[in-house]
């Protein structure tokens, strides 16, 4: 499938032992502080499905969760399991793990001076941010479908489209639920400052989710998002992921790439950000 590099990555096992006994008291303490901070902030901000998952998994019983114990609950709920990885794994390997309902989680804990910003996903981002969502049956199926779509994308040179979909849903997704705007993206849920910014600031765009539109949109990794895409429910996300991505990729060939702050005329806009520029479409 795809290039020889992808084939090699697909055959390599990137998982490691979590080595739970190797964590220091300081690292467990960092988990507890981060947990306390986010769990105080997230009621009425996170979607109810995340908060329910957090309760079910009991991630606050004294430090960094032991994946062996965590997996007993998670597997019983949706058949997903968490596997430890040293850092980012190559895309092909990442997709293969997701397609098999295995979520790769960084085993390292951030340093106390990095409470608010990290460039690589650590155990707090991966476990607190992502794993509660994997207890929800529909979201759990979406993540598997995403992994399968990712494996197929390797044949079409469409990785950038898939990476954008992941970014604007799994990492930075918002949902318009019965009680208003709520967070389901793990990149937000594990961030104290973005949990408030994404809902309350007038600055970012909030635009109704549209699959090809998302696949055409660049993103920023070094600052708050300038655009959030908003879904109605997880069933919508799952049914979108059953679409024929190949025909979407073909339709997107030669299409423009939108800058992160761009607003299109055809967008269904919930909030037009105060920082947006109408002329920010750039050729691919
Ligand atoms: N590896 N461990 C890990 N975690 C990720 O979130 C991750 C990754 N490899 C690739 C990747 N994400 C992204 O490029 C996907 O969006 C495609
Ligand atoms: Fe993540």
Image: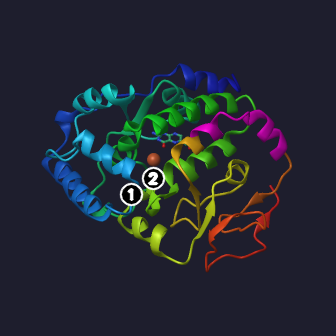
The spot of residue 183 in percent (x, y) is 44, 58
Q: Residues within 10 Å of mark 2 (few under 14, many from 20)?
A: many
Q: Closest to the observer: 260 or 84?
A: 260
Residue at figure coordinates x 23%, y 40% from the top left = 65
Q: Residue at the far bottom: name it.
A: 274
Side of 20 where 263 appears, left or right: right
The spot of residue 88 in percent (x, y) is 47, 40
Q: Secondary structure at mark 2?
A: loop
Q: How is the image coloured?
A: rainbow
The spot of residue 92 in percent (x, y) is 58, 30
- Note whether residue 134 is visible: yes
Asked if 131 appears above or below 195 in the picture, the reply is above
Determine if the C-beta at disc 1 is less than 8 A from ligand 2: no
Residue at figure coordinates x 24%, y 28% from the top left = 68
Instruction: Please state the extent of the stretch shown in magenta in the rendering.
Output: 238-252
Residue on which the image places disc 2: 184
Instruction: Say which mark, if any, is on residue 46.
Output: 1
């Amino acid at each position: 499938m795809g290039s020889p590099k992808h084939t090699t990555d697909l055959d390599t096992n990137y998982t490691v032992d979590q080595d739970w006994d190797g964590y220091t008291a300081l690292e467990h303490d960092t988990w507890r502080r981060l947990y306390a901070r986010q769990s105080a902030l997230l009621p009425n901000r996170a979607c109810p499905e995340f908060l329910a998952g957090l309760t079910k998994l009991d991630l606050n019983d004294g430090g960094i969760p032991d994946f062996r114990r965590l997996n007993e609950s998670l597997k019983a709920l949706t058949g997903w399991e968490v596997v430890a990885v040293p850092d980012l794994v190559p895309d092909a390997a990442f997709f293969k793990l997701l397609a098999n309902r295995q979520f790769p989680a960084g085993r390292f804990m951030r340093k106390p001076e990095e409470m608010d910003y990290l460039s690589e996903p650590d155990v707090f981002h991966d476990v607190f941010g992502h794993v509660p969502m994997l207890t929800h049956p529909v979201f759990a199926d979406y993540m598997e479908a995403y992994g399968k779509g990712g494996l197929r994308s390797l044949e079409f040179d469409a990785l950038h489209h898939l990476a954008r979909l992941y970014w604007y849903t799994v990492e930075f997704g918002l949902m318009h639920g019965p009680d208003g705007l709520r967070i389901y993206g793990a990149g937000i849920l594990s961030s104290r400052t973005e949990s408030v910014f994404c809902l309350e600031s007038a600055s970012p765009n909030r635009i109704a989710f549209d699959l090809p539109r998302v696949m055409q949109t660049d993103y920023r990794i070094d600052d708050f998002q300038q655009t959030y895409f908003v879904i109605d429910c997880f069933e919508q996300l799952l049914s979108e992921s059953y679409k024929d991505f190949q025909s979407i990729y073909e339709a997107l060939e030669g299409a423009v790439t939108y800058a992160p702050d761009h607003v299109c005329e055809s967008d269904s806009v919930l909030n037009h950000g105060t920082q947006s520029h109408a002329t920010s479409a750039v050729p691919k």
